[in-house]
Image: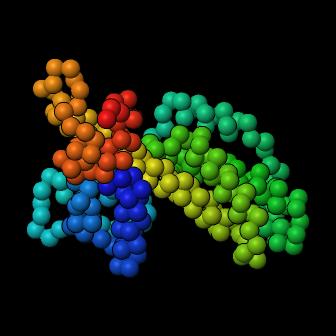
Amino acid sequence: MDVLEFQKKLEGICALAEKNNKKLTTEQVREYFEAAELEKEQLIKILQYLKIKGISIEGIPGNDTKESSNIEKVEEKQEPLTKEEEIYLKNYLEGLSEEEKEETEVLFQRMTEGDVLAQAKIARKYLPEAAHMAVEMNCKSIFLGDLIQEANVGLLTALEEEEPKQKNEEWLLGRIRFSIRHAIEEQEQQNFEDDYLVSKVEKLESAVKELTEEEEDGELKFSIDELAVILDMDAEEIRDVLRLTGDDKE
């Protein structure tokens, strides 16, 4: 299974969950990815990704294995800031200009009436809020600075949206949170694809080493087409992986 197929699998399992009220069992996930021969750590990462997408994972009745226990502990949680992120946050917040005190409801009402200045004031007013929300949702996948930028993009984009006609603070904070979560989901999916590709490379390297270790000159005992049959992989996929390792010999 190549990276694109793996991505389609992720989309497919999410679609399956949508049809089942965003609920899946660990058994369904295992069966869905069975052909991919996932390691336990990869399975746990997939379950973590599904939880970030708002999909709940039900345990398997009567199964109390260590693996199931680990899976159930996978939860979305705030990741503590690194020293670098703490410094970034401090400098970022200090660099924001203080906004004049003005009633929030009044500003939103003025923006609804087409007041561009009020819209700009709202944007400046909620930049610190967006940063603090990014901190609350901080994760290992994305540097806090990048997450804050995603929050800011969500803030500015939301203020340009035509709907709803009557905007308010609750709506705006919800849109910012959505942008942050979307950025995290995209990065998590990219990480899964990268991990999957790395796993493919490692497995192929191991297999090629095993198949060539008896050769004194280190040359392949088999052609790529023959390896494709032996390893049950597509020949072009083997070529792609071997190019990554600098070992693309026919």
Q: Residue at x 23, y 60 (%)?
A: 35
The reply, left or right, for residue 20 in relation to residue 150 is left
- The relative height of residue 60 versus residue 151 in the rendered view (above or below) is below
Residue 117 picture location, percent across and down? 88, 58
Quarter of the figure that contains the N terminus: bottom left
The reply, left or right, for residue 146 in relation to residue 198 is right
Total marks placed: 0
Q: Residue at x 58, y 52 (%)?
A: 133
- The relative height of residue 226 versus residue 121 in the rendered view (above or below) is above
Q: Is residue 34 visible?
A: yes
The reply, left or right, for residue 59 in relation to residue 91 is left
- The relative height of residue 196 versus residue 175 in the rendered view (above or below) is above
Q: Is residue 48 visible?
A: no
Q: Residue at x 36, y 47 (%)?
A: 236
The answer to which of 189 and 223 lies nearer the viewer is: 223
Quarter of the figure that contains the C terminus: top left
The answer to which of 138 and 222 lies nearer the viewer is: 222
Task: Tell me how the rendering is colored.
Answer: rainbow
Query: Which of the 4 image quadrants contains residue 101?
Result: bottom right
Residue 79 picture location, percent across and down? 44, 44
Residue 7 picture location, percent across and down? 41, 58
The answer to which of 203 and 193 lies nearer the viewer is: 203
Residue 234 picture location, percent across and down? 31, 51
Q: Residue at x 19, y 33 (%)?
A: 221
The reply, left or right, for residue 213 in relation to residue 127 is left
